[in-house]
Every structure is written in C-alpha cells, then in structure tokens.
Amino acid sequence: MIAPADNEANHGIPERLAKHTVRYANCQDVNIDDLTPMMRHYVQVKQEYPHALLLYRVGDFFETFFEDGITIARELELVLTSKECGKVVGRVPMAGIPHHALDRYCIQLVEKGYAVAICDQVEDPAQAQGLVKREVTRVITPGTVIEEGMLSARRNNFLAAVVLAGQSWGLAYADVSTGEFFTTQHTDLDQVGQELMRLQPSETLFPTDTPDLRAMLRPGEASDQLPECLPRQFCYTLRSQGSFSHTEARQRLLQTFRLRSLEGIGCDHLPLAVRAAGGLLEYLEDTQKDTQVPLQLLSTYVLSDFLVLDHQTRRNLEITQTCRDGTYNGSLLWALDRTVTAMGGRALRRWLLQPLLSVEKIQERQTTIQELVDDGSLRTSLQQQLKQIYDLERLAGRAGSGTANGRDLVALADSFARLPILAALVEAVESPYLQALQHVPPDLEKLGGHAAIAPGREPAPLPHRRQSHSPRGER
C-alpha cells in the first residue's frame, strides 16, 4: 500500500513536538485488515464515533491514533509519537495521556469545542483471553459535562436544541449537571438568536438532512446547514431529522417522564417545542450510554412573561461582562453577587438575564428582600447556614446519574442535615420565597441524619479516578 501524500508534514504541530513523520493522517487511509487486532478494534470504534476524539485505554494511558492523535497533540501541545500497527502499515501517529489526568485534559478539549469518546476497559485484564474487552463508556461533549472539575460553579452549562419551521421555531435547553429542563416556541426568527445569546449554550443541537449527520461544528466554523438566524459563535451538533420528528419526540417525552399527556407541562399545543425537547432527550440517551441523566420534569415557558433584552442591550448594560474587555470583574453581576452558594450565584445570573414582567412576581421578590433587609439577625443566620451547604443541584445530579463518589454523598448528607435548621430560622417569616424553606421532606431529613454517624467523613467533592491495567503484550 502506498501512503497518501501529505502537503503539511506536521499538521500544525510545532516541530519540537513532532517526533513522528506522518504517513497516515486518517484511519480511512489504511486497509483495516492490515492492522493488528487492537488497532482494528480502535478503527471500528472510531467509525462509530466520527464526530468525537476517541480516547482508547491502553494500560495506564488513554491513547489516540491517526487524525485524533494529530488533533490532540496539536491542541494539548503533547508530543506526537507513533505506534507499530502491522507489517504492511508500519507506524501510525499516536498521542497519549495518563489515565489519572483524564479529567484535566478533557476539560481543555471540551473548552475548545471538541467531543470526547472514552473507550475504557470493561473487564479485568488478568481474566482476559486475548484482547481486553473495551467499550465506549461515555461521550463527553461541551453540553453534557457533569464532572465538577469541568464546570463553572456559578454559571449553568446548557445544552440546547433548536427546530425551525418557516418563520416559527422551537427551543429546548437543559443543564445536565443540575437537571433543569425547559422548552418554548415562538414565531419570530429574530428571537431565536437572541434567546441563544441569553442562554450562552455550550452546545446546540440542530436537525438537518446533511450527509454528515454526526458532525460537530466548533465555534466560528461555517456550514451551509446552519441558517442565518443561528449565531455562529456557538458549538453546533448536527443531528438526524428522525429523532426530532413530532411523533418520536412526543413519545420519548411521555415515556421519560411517565406521562399520559403533555397538557400538564404546557407544551401539548407546541409541536416545535415538543420536537426540540424530544430530540434533546434522544441525544442524551445516545451520548450518556448507561449513565442515567436525572432531568427535572420539563417546564414550558413563554417569552412574553419576561423582559426581552437583546444582545446589544445586555452588552451596553454590562450585565455579566464589561464592554471594554469582556471580563466579569466590573460587570453588574460582579457588583451585585453576594450569594454564598453556587446555586444562588447561578440563580442571580438567570434573574438578571431574564427579568420578570409580572408585577405580582416582582413584588414577591421585593417582599423577600425587604424582609431580609429589615431583619439583620435573620439575614446573618441564614448566610451562616447557607455557607455550610454544598452545591445540592449538582451533587444530586451526580448522585442521580450514578457518578457520585463517597465525598459527594457525604456532602449531600451534610447539606441535608442543615435543612431543618434553615426551616426553623424561617418559621415566622411572611415572604413566599422564605416560606418555601419551612417544609423539609422527611426523606431528606432522614438522609441528613446519616451524616452524623458516617465514619471518616470528608465532604470535599473530588473527581473519581478509575484504576485498571492492561497486559503489557497487548497490541
């Protein structure tokens, strides 16, 4: 086999990092039958996930080859080396990262707009007969991150989905880490871009008939498949129209939330909103594999319930970042945010970006603030207790998805143990926001009681690291 010509020898990799002269820059350039058994499996898995960078567990490393090896070496400034893949093929490009540094490197790749497919060992290498069994256990995309180290504590990480039909559009968005799930529908195409600019989603799904259905467009990348109304500064994932059909989307929503009808959640008469929400759920099922994403019951909202601030107005008002250099310091949110929990910080950001129009709801917030201003003792006591509460939204998300570790569970129990204290503090309040804290579900109170008897408590959430090894002789 003659290796294909390559005009750019280093593929954007600095010469100091290029320890291999690339002959095969794409796995499609080789005959799969000429590869070693392990590399044949790698190529087969890569063909199933063409849109993602494939990290393949080999011993104490996650290795990646061909085009993904080149990309990772370039983006992470790693040495591009090579691996022997058979007598006919010879050596192919390779880059690798230590398994214990997986989270750190995934953060960098996701921040750059890449999807990452993690192909891990799923059997004990000591018991393996021949090739160790490997499967893709997780696909991490910019909008499906749940790991604490990959998230900003005080802002949501939204995954959005947009469906267009003429001049009308449907939008659904969810934060996989907190469980929030919303949908809406509107008739003005100009508004869909403004809503995306408000949400600042990390990833947006868009159904299309393009042949490259699983492509991911990084921020700024152009595509004929994206209409002009969608801002180009976001990451877009192109999906099949099938999962966004009304029939399939509606059925998926009913099954997921065990409903008989969509009337109770307010979107039965909004077909585009239903399509967007159902397509988003299908994407989560496709990427999360065996990990259950515990989303809250879908909530439908109407744009007319809120004051619509276009992107230019938000920029001029410097709500979340300054006009001069686009930084958080010096913005309105920076000046106002005195919240003592990450949950409060995210809520305040949402309130500022989506102001209420209902006089009644505005007055409810004002009543709450006035009561806290008037009662300094109550305010101080609440702050002291809230400071001891961890990020319940994201801790509950990891617990619900089965990815929480021991420290996460202890942090949950410690936080639940504080809820009865909060309830006692607001026993005599009048504002509805504070009255909502008066009732503590018995199950949560019971779970909080376990915190007092948990041995060796260390409630600082830390990333979980899996340990497994591969036989030295595996190829």
Image: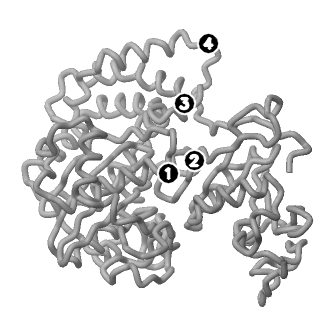
Question: Farthest top residue?
Answer: 453
Location of residue 131 in the rendering, given as x and y in whole percent from the top left corner: 79, 43
How many other residues sit within 10 Å of disc 4, few (<14), some (14-19) or many (≥20)? few
Query: Along the polypeptide, which appears first: circle 3 or circle 2?
Result: 2
Identify the residue under disc 1. Answer: 287
How many other residues sit within 10 Å of disc 1, few (<14), some (14-19) or many (≥20)? some
Q: Amino acid at mark 4?
A: Pro
Identify the residue under disc 3. Answer: 408
Q: Quadrant of the N terminus?
A: bottom right
Vertical relation: 401 (above or below) 195: above
Identify the residue under disc 2. Answer: 138
Vertical relation: 197 (above or below) 161: below
Location of residue 101 in the rendering, given as x and y in whole percent from the top left corner: 73, 48
Q: Amino acid at mark 1?
A: Thr
Nearer the camera: disc 3 or disc 1: 1
**C-alpha span from label 3 to label 1:** 23 Å
316 left or right of 2?
A: left
The answer, for residue 349, to whether it is visible in the render is no
